[in-house]
Image: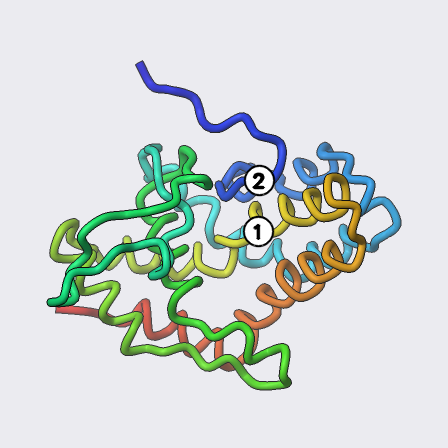
Amino acid sequence: MQRPGARLAVLLANARLIEQAAPLEAIANIQSPYLADKDWHAQLSELLLPWHQALHPLLRDQPPLWTHNDWHASNLLWNADGSVSSVLDFGLADRTFALFDLATAIERNAVPWLDLDSGGTASADLDSVDALLAGYHQVRPLSAKDLHTLSALLPLVHVDFALSEVAYYHDVVGSTASADVAYYAYLLGHLRWFDGAQGQRLLAHIRRPRV
């Protein structure tokens, strides 16, 4: 018997919205007070739907399982030889699928997102990407189809969590300014980045054949 996913209302990292056939309808059903006066439908139609149309047919081949969903280097304890000794912070764990965790690891470890705040280009560290993929491949081999799916998923892996941050900061904390950061810089900003030269460079690198 499979256990259901997490039931918390905010600060969730999962794929419940991007797994939907009609993600904008699913977002509308949230009835977010923050989004009520935003032109979010037009913005996400432009920035999210093209990625989603490429990804959604690939998700039917992804078996559901429990994943960590915050696979960042700071949530690991390390041995002196560079190997991982233990994993910390399962607060965002939920039922998604294996490649969701790998995409999260790449998105959170290999792209210096803070560079965008200072007007930089946030050029992905491709050596870190290769190290993550090589380590993952040693445990669970990645096929060409897996890499294609990973590339399609990466621009959207942050979407559910970004919207949950919007809800948390606006509805729980009461900080519209923080909700604005989550919406404009995190949700929309990351979508735009993947559509630009640096994002395309990263996605092409992931798709390339590997031995």
Tell me which numbered mark, 1 or 2, is placed earlier along the sequence: 2
Q: Give the image location of residue 47, x and y in percent.
A: 65, 61
Circle on res. 103: none
Residue 173 visible (yes or no)? yes
Q: CA distance from mark 1 to mark 2?
A: 8 Å
The amino acid beneath tag 2 is Leu
Residue 165 is left or right of residue 7, and the answer is: right
On the image, which quarter does residue 73 sit in? bottom left
Image location of residue 168, percent across then percent down: 68, 43
Side of 76 where 151 appears, left or right: right
> Which residue appears at 63% of the width and 77% of the height?
117
Mark 2, other Cα within 10 Å: few <14 / some 14–19 / many ≥20: some
Residue 149 in sight in this render: no
Kind of residue at badge 1: Val
Q: Residue at x 58, y 66 (%)?
A: 190
Q: Secondary structure at mark 2?
A: loop
On-image quarter of the C terminus:
bottom left
Write the residue at 45% across / 27% down. Answer: 5
Q: Residue at x 11, y 67 (%)?
A: 81
Q: Residues within 10 Å of mark 1 (few under 14, many from 20)?
A: many
Q: Secondary structure at mark 1?
A: helix
Q: Are marks 1 and 2 in contact (CB under 8 Å)?
A: yes
**Residue 64 percent across, percent down from the top left:** 35, 33
Picture quarter with the N terminus = top left
**Residue annotated with mark 2:** 17
- Point out residue 186 in the picture as x, y percentages from the top left corner: 62, 62
As drawn, the label of residue 159 is 1
Number of on-image labels:
2
